[in-house]
Image (cartoon, grey):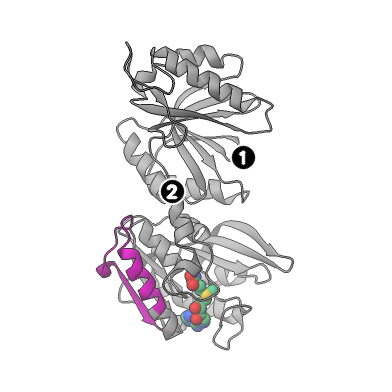
Amino acid sequence: MDLLLIQSQEHETLPLAELKAVLACEDIDCDVEVIAQGLILLKSLNELDFYKNYKVLVRRLAYTHEIHELILRTDLYNLERDFNSVNWNDYIEKDFVVRIKRFEKVNIDTTAIERKLGHLILSSNNAVYGASEKTDGIDFKVNLNNPESFIRVVATQKEVFIGIEKLKLNKKHFQDLKPHKRPFFYPGSMSPKLARCMVNLSHIKEDQLLLDPFCGTGGILIEGAMIGTKLIGSDINWKMKNGTLINLDYCSNLDYCDICENDFEAHHIDVRELKLYKKVDAVVTDPPYGISTSTGGEKSGKIFHQFLESIDYNMKENAYLCIAHPHYLDIDPFLNELGFKLLERHKIKMHKSLTRIISVIKKTN
Ligand SMILES: C[S@@+](CC[C@H](N)C(=O)[O-])C[C@H]1O[C@@H](n2cnc3c(N)ncnc32)[C@H](O)[C@@H]1O
């Protein structure tokens, strides 16, 4: 069985890197085919685990907009014929909508095709358009606003993909929990989407232990909470430590977040003195750059070096570290010196004089 993913195109490399990290750490075995930037097929997924894995991807991915079970792969020329060969009773129970998305600037009349395909589904079952009385077939209806079955058609220059969205991603969370909407706010917290992506790049799984030693308002830890990890935060500033606890407590009361108060803790401590009672599975963090957030009077280069020294002690063997740092800070000599291995690096242009670098690093010593 295959899944069709439509990803954000707001960044060139992060959406695919995030997906690959989740597939790897969740042991989801499949072939990844990149059809176009932002359009991915996950092929030959095991049938038995299919919906379990579908659910995991929906729960975790930040830079993926839609995930569909693939029904059909065809081309524009054969679209109607192949669409008609589908037994829509297997996919639709009540009402549905057909929506088209174009990739690679393919030149088609989307409204006309949506209508045509909608009619094909209706006539496949001898059902009625927009009415509710039963005819010979099952009572399918078109519902443009709140359909039970969402049929996604994706057209590229060469091919057309038809899928059905069985599970929806929680996009509302990324809006509702933007930094300024949380109970405790302080400037300098990254977007929830990027924070979630970094958590995913760290290869952490549900119930494993995630540390952010520069936790600030807890933005990264909140995203760990959303995928069910245990959490430790620490910050040199006690107000931030308290703010993190306030924000995590708020999350534990959200109906879509499973963590409880035993799953998280926060400490008021300088990262250079951090010695946790247990080693963590991953570290995800956004240290101060010395521009908009406090570095406690220290130059940021020095802080990064001392941070890496101290964090090494707190990580399990083979644990991942996903860290954001400014382009002008070369952390590679520190990594080499301390036995960390750089796995991948992504650039995010913030403004003219700042590019944020996301480095994914593994402890190897
Ligand atoms: C960029 S902010 C982190 C933002 C955070 N990700 C959030 O969601 O709010 C960096 C944080 O590092 C803290 N900090 C600075 N120097 C530190 C040190 N030596 N040890 C621990 N925390 C430190 C600051 O107090 C600040 O809260």
Query: Is residue 48 in view?
Result: yes
Q: Residue 141: say if magenta.
A: no
Q: Which is more toward the observer, 91 or 344?
A: 91
Q: Is 185 above or below relative to 178? A: below
Image quadrant where residue 128 sits:
top left
Name the residue that disc number 2 marks: 22
Q: Amino acid at mark 1?
A: Gln
State the image coordinates of residue 330 (x, y, percent, origin top left): 65, 70
Q: Horizontally, is 174 left or right of 106 in the view?
A: left
Mark 1 Cα shell of 10 Å, populated few (<14), some (14-19), many (≥20):
some
SS class, disc 1: loop
Q: Is 68 above or below relative to 60? A: above
Q: Which is more toward the observer, 250 or 315?
A: 250
Query: Is residue 202 in view?
Result: no
Residue at the extreme right of the image, as rendered: 352
Task: Name the mark on residue 157.
Answer: none
State the image coordinates of residue 12 (x, y, percent, origin top left): 63, 48
Query: For the magenta stretch, what is the residue range?
Result: 243-269
For marks 1 and 2, give the one nearer the viewer: 1
Residue at the extreme bottom of the image, as rendered: 297
Q: Amino acid at mark 2?
A: Val
SS class, disc 2: helix
Earlier-in-chain disc, 1 versus 2: 2
Name the residue that disc number 1 marks: 37
Q: Which is more toward the observer, 86 or 237?
A: 86
Q: Is 94 above or below relative to 232? A: above
Which quadrant is the C terminus positioned in? bottom left
State the image coordinates of residue 310 (x, y, percent, origin top left): 45, 78
